[in-house]
Image (tube, rainbow, N blue to C red):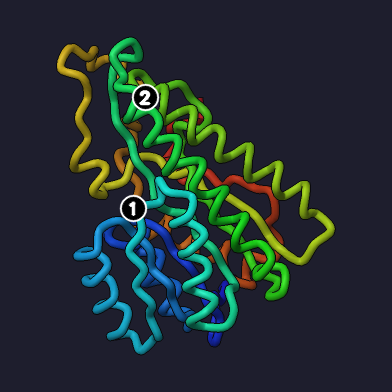
Amino acid sequence: MTIEIAMPGKVALVTGAASGLGRATALKLAQAGAHLCIVDVNPEGLAETKGLLESAGVDVLVHPADLCDPAACKSSVTAAVERFGRLDALCNVAGLIYLANSHEMPENLWHRMIAVNLTAPFMLSQAAIPHLLEADGAIVNVASSASFIGEAYAAAYCATKAGLVNMTKAMAMEYMRKPIRINAVAPGGMITNIAVNFRPPEDCDFELLKRFSGMRGTVEVDDVADMVALLASPAGRGYHGNCISIDAGITAG
């Protein structure tokens, strides 16, 4: 069976698009014919992504924003709709992880992870839903295998990702009778900027870290981007209120 992901004339907003999974997702949606509003706190990375997208012949709006600010979340959606006149998909990809002993977690970093990983997807969704209802559109949230298992030194990250999965399900139930689809994907570890900058506490127990490192290694970014693009597109019409695990077996047992 061949699944065709086609979004000609449709518009997608992708956060975290300056690198990693966000960039890969934007490229997949561009290949499907979508126009893109790409959002990130990193303007240099966004400029690089824009160049890659424009080479695919799609219209691109670059919108630098710090998603810790709820107003910036709402303005991102407003900018996309003002530029393109519609919104068909919201892909909440941006995320942060900071590892620490729980008793030493800096308060500001706890709040920043909550803001980017959990509050921002809600605020973006809140602003996007009226437009997505008009377009029979979709929301795709990027969770993590950490949504389902406890990971040492990652209490804040696990809390945000578990919350994101249940937020996805709750919103899916709320809009069960409306023309919108709301889903999530839960990747395992990927080779992205987050992985490159992965810094466990100096006194960490590496045996505990190995418990969530995955026996089959890391997950391919493109594989996850394919699923995000599927769920964002009309080809994902059968999915609603789901969280698709793509973790090479980390949460299997």
Residue 234 image offset from top left, x and y in percent: 64, 72
Of the numbered discs 2 and 1, the one sitting upstream in the chain is 2
How far apart marks 2 and 1 lie (CA) works out to: 22 Å
Task: Please identify the residue farthest to the front as the structure is shown.
Answer: 71
Task: Give the number of the disc on residue 154.
Answer: 2
Residue 175 in which image quadrant:
bottom right
The quarter of the picture where the N terminus appears is bottom right
15 horizontally vs 134: left or right: left
User: Which is nearer the eye, 138 or 70?
Assistant: 70
Residue 89 image offset from top left, x and y in percent: 56, 68
Residue that numbered label 1 is attached to: 220
* Residue ID at (22%, 35%): 198
Residue 10 in which image quadrant:
bottom right
User: Which is nearer the eye, 83 or 10?
Assistant: 83
* Residue ID at (52%, 59%): 74
| 152 relative to 233, above or below | above
Residue 54 image offset from top left, x and y in percent: 31, 84
Three-letter code for the amino acid on which mark 1 is drawn: Glu
* Residue ID at (28%, 20%): 100
Task: Please tell me whether mark 2 or mark 1 is closer to you in this view.
Answer: 2
Neighbour class for label 2 at 10 Å: few (<14), some, many (≥20)?
Answer: some
Three-letter code for the amino acid on which mark 2 is drawn: Ala
